[in-house]
Image: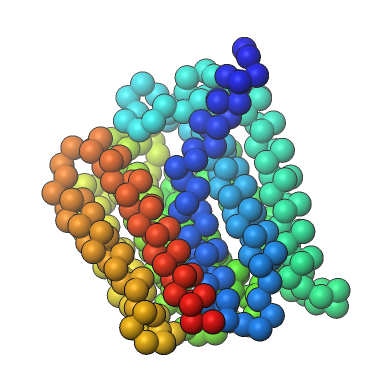
Amino acid sequence: MSQKSLLTIWVTAARLRTLPLSVAGIVVGNALAIQNEEFCPYAFGGTLLTAIVFQILSNFANDYGDGIKGTDNHERIGPKRVLQQNLLSPKTLLKGIVITAVVGFLLAAATVSIAFEAGETKSVFTFLGLAVVAIVAAYKYTAGKGAYGYHALGDVFVFAFFGLLAVGGSFYLQTKQLDPHIWWFAFAIGGLSTAVLNLNNMRDMQNDTKAGKKTVAAFLGLKSAKTYHSILVLGSITSFMAGLTNIADGWIGYAPLLMVFPLLLQLKSTRKLEIHGAFDGLLKPLALSIFGTSIILLLTQIMGA
């Protein structure tokens, strides 16, 4: 196997299309903190890199867990995974998981050292602890015994990590406090991120059910899963609008609401679909809409600084 083809395999396993969504909450948390006098761009960059590495870790672990359990089989609708195609051995992929986890923790430690002073020991250890929890959660999503993704808990963890922790944690790193209004945005990003997972699970629900993987979508059935999806998207839009009323300074502050229109159009399309494989086409647009919303919010906050 050539070095180039091996690199391509690892890039495939990293699932680059998932990375914009992984940083949306980080961008939002820093956008809300950017007008703080002590805002540190290096901490912002470190948090972004850490989130990206943790997402890649999660993707490797998901490939590994579903691969060795046989969930990724010939009946799977989504993109083919590297273990599923025998492009990497389980042992090699596991080594990649360990290395990525170490890199992620070191990045988290470096970011924490930038964000906090030497005497802020409690905050330092809290965030290092959260980094360890994130690593364990990334692995245990589908890998190992008792993988929570197989017991309809994936939605809870996505909401917590992509929303509450990403927005709240990154805001705290910059400001050393948690303002009440940030939770509107945390709920919104968490809810929309969960909607992405729900789309993924609606796509895979038939094969997941056969493989014994219990997701919320598989538990609800397609019709109720669509209703659940609508609640996630509409609830998130409402939460985001409520958050903007607390921080918007003039009409430009409401510019992120432009992303409501593609979100509603995508929701309309989701409601109409009946073929499971068709949900795959909506994953990327929804993830990019969430990322786009975070970028517009960041730009409006920079303009208001």
Identify the image quadrant of the C terminus: bottom right
- In this view, the residue in front, 52 or 148, is 52
Above-or-below relation of 143 to 70: below
Residue 192 seen anywhere in this rendered image of the structure: yes
Residue 145 seen anywhere in this rendered image of the structure: no
Compared across the picture, whether 78 is left or right of 231 comes to right
Above-or-below relation of 273 to 130: above
Place of residue 36 in the rendered image (x, y in percent of width and height, measured from the top left): 62, 82
Above-or-below relation of 252 to 89: below
Q: Residue at x 81, y 75 (%)?
A: 117
Identify the image quadrant of the N terminus: top right
Residue most extreme to the top: 1
Place of residue 113 in the rendered image (x, y in percent of width and height, measured from the top left): 79, 65
Q: How many numbered markers are drawn?
A: 0
Q: Residue at x 77, y 73 (%)?
A: 116
Image quadrant of residue 256? bottom left
Image quadrant of residue 250? bottom left
Compared across the picture, whether 141 is left or right of 204 comes to right
Place of residue 239 in the rendered image (x, y in percent of width and height, measured from the top left): 35, 75
Q: Residue at x 72, y 45 (%)?
A: 103
